[in-house]
Image (cartoon, rainbow, N blue to C red):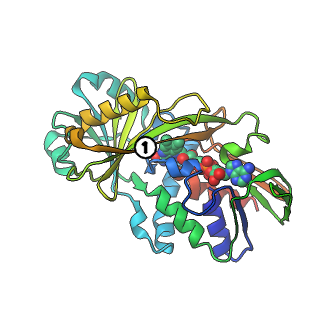
Amino acid sequence: MGRLLAWRLARAGHRVSVVDPASCPAEPVAAGFTAAGMLSPLAEREHAEPEVVALGWRSLQLWPGIAAALARPGLVKTEGSLLLAHGCDLGAALRVLARLQGEPEPLNAAALQMLEPALAPDLKAWWLPGEGQLLPRELLVSLAEQAPGVDWQWGRRAMAVRPHVVDLDDGRRVDADLVIDTRGLGAKPDLPTLRGVRGEVLWLHAPGVALNRPVRLMHPRHRVYLVPRPGDVIVVGASEVESEDRSPVSLRSAVELMAAAHSVLPALAEARIVHMETNLRPALPDHKPRIDHESGLLRINGLFRHGWLLAPALAEKALEHV
Ligand SMILES: Cc1cc2nc3c(=O)[nH]c(=O)nc-3n(C[C@H](O)[C@H](O)[C@H](O)COP(=O)(O)OP(=O)(O)OC[C@H]3O[C@@H](n4cnc5c(N)ncnc54)[C@H](O)[C@@H]3O)c2cc1C
């Protein structure tokens, strides 16, 4: 959220300073680095408020233009996604589908085979047109590197944030017309009801296993998705654990995520597990994003499971306040 706003405001001619604890643009500190990068307002409708869904569709309109302005159009794709279920879980899947709006379109076996030939042939499938995905790490780096003239304070942390003033951890203070607080979970001292929700992902290297778009398995016990990345990598995610523990991925999450992924894409049997990662989603009690504005201070937080899905539309909405 912070990097997108910095980029947008700098391009609009404002003088922008960013305080970022990362030592360089590519250091993966923010939850945004861990995210799978799914842009799925329809599939997330099962648990997300209508407001999140509406902002999500607006962001899907905005992301391609942002990627084009960064001269990286390939970082965002909107080629749809699939919901999948095993036949034995059809009952549970139909309950989920009933809670989605927009009526996902059922696909027959031949259509599924044509779209995603590597998927297990006996899967039930539904098509979600218009959904998309983006490459979070590349976008975060591009936004930081291409924000014109931004005074980037790498390796610095805000100790206190108040209207017009940010106190830094080296004792200096930054004065500004407007302070924008996008610290995610780091804003907890000022937003006591904010909590971190642990999410775990793993990366598989699977040369020759073609997956053309994100797919999500509707499983009675887990929500598991597989997201293709360049270089024959498939990201499998994500757990959702009520904990602020940032320690490495648990055996239980790894086993459940990998078993589900293998059941969907049997050719993953020989894939190599190349990376596992944990991070915390910043969530408010109602799981909705929140914008607070007073003179000299704008706070944006509570992006929970949907930071990438929400960011451009939320930036647009937040800047209307100022
Ligand atoms: C496993 C997982 C999978 C996900 N998948 C998706 C997905 O597919 N699609 C999607 O839309 N969303 C996804 N998300 C959610 C998304 O990552 C978050 O909603 C989003 O990152 C929140 O953005 P943010 O900018 O508010 O917080 P963050 O991304 O956490 O960024 C907060 C920033 O503030 C900095 N900060 C903290 N404290 C301070 C301080 N004191 N001073 C200065 N800076 C500070 C942090 O270092 C960080 O850079 C996923 C999250 C996880 C964990």
User: Image quadrant for the C terminus?
Assistant: bottom right
Residue position for label 1? 42
Residue 15: percent from the left, percent from the top? 74, 74
- Residue 145 point in image, percent of width and height: 57, 71
Q: Is residue 183 shown to the viewer in this render?
A: no
Q: Classify mark 1: helix, strand or loop.
A: loop
Q: Residue at 51% of width from left, 67% of height from top?
A: 66
Dot 1 amino acid type: Leu
Q: Residue at x 42, y 28 (%)?
A: 251
Is residue 127 or residue 135 the one in the foreground? 135
Is residue 311 visible in this depiction of the protein? yes
Q: Position of residue 111 (x, y in %)?
A: 17, 46
> What crowding class fits label 1: few (fewer than 14 Cα within 10 Å), some (14-19), or many (20 or more)?
many
Relative to residue 228, is residue 315 drawn left or right?
right
Q: Position of residue 211 (x, y in %)?
A: 26, 50
Q: Is residue 160 left or right of residue 194?
A: right
- The quarter of the picture where residue 21 lies is bottom right
Q: In this view, does 258 lie above or below 226?
A: above
| Quadrant of the rendering where the N terminus is positioned | bottom right
Q: Camera-side residue: 79 or 192? A: 192
At horizontal 56% and vertical 38% (from top left) the residue drawn is: 49
**Does 151 sit left or right of 264 as displayed?**
right
Is residue 241 placed above or below 10 in the rendered structure?
above
